[in-house]
Image (cartoon, rainbow, N blue to C red):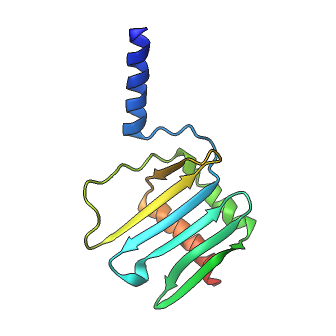
Amino acid sequence: MKKLRVMVMALSLCTMLFGCSAKGPWQSLTYHVTSSVMTEGCHFYLSRDDGMLSGYCYDGEVEYRQDEAKQIPAETVEAIVAMELENASTARGKLFGVLDGTEVTVTLGYPDGSERKISLSAEQQAQIFRLLQKELVGK
């Protein structure tokens, strides 16, 4: 019995440290950029099941805001789903916040109400941003 408890604790620790993800398909995606430069900040919320997008972003100096969710093309949602974000590692907490820079946070929401911040490459972050900005801005 003691061995079983030790194994469960070790597995839990590994999951926390290395970001194992066995939650299955995500239901929502939140993409948020915090920046010291206002026009670099943005926030997108995408519902996977119905393809609804809300949020805000900038295109140059112009702010685009969509407070009420709008339908986006299924192809855009499919392109994001094809990135297999559920397989991304869990983002590790940072000891210090961003003082003068940009921080990108990507969070997946699951049907059971849980959320998981994930770690993506700069290329993956840029791809999601481009897809969602295009839909919000309409260009």
**87 to 139, vertically: above or below:** above
**38 to 108, vertically: above or below:** below
Residue at (54% x, 62% y) in the render: 30
**102 to 78, vertically: above or below:** below
On the rendered structure, is 66 left or right of 51? left
On the rendered structure, is 109 left or right of 121? right
The C terminus - image quarter:
bottom right
Disc count in the image?
0
Residue at (41% x, 79% y) in the render: 40
- Residue 88 in percent (x, y) is at 49, 48
- Residue 107 in percent (x, y) is at 51, 56
Residues 122 and 31: in front is 31
Q: Residue furthest top?
A: 1
- Residue 137 in percent (x, y) is at 60, 83
The N terminus - image quarter:
top left
Q: Residue furthest bottom?
A: 61
On the rendered structure, is 106 left or right of 65? left
Residue at (29% x, 66% y) in the render: 98
- Residue 39 in percent (x, y) is at 42, 84
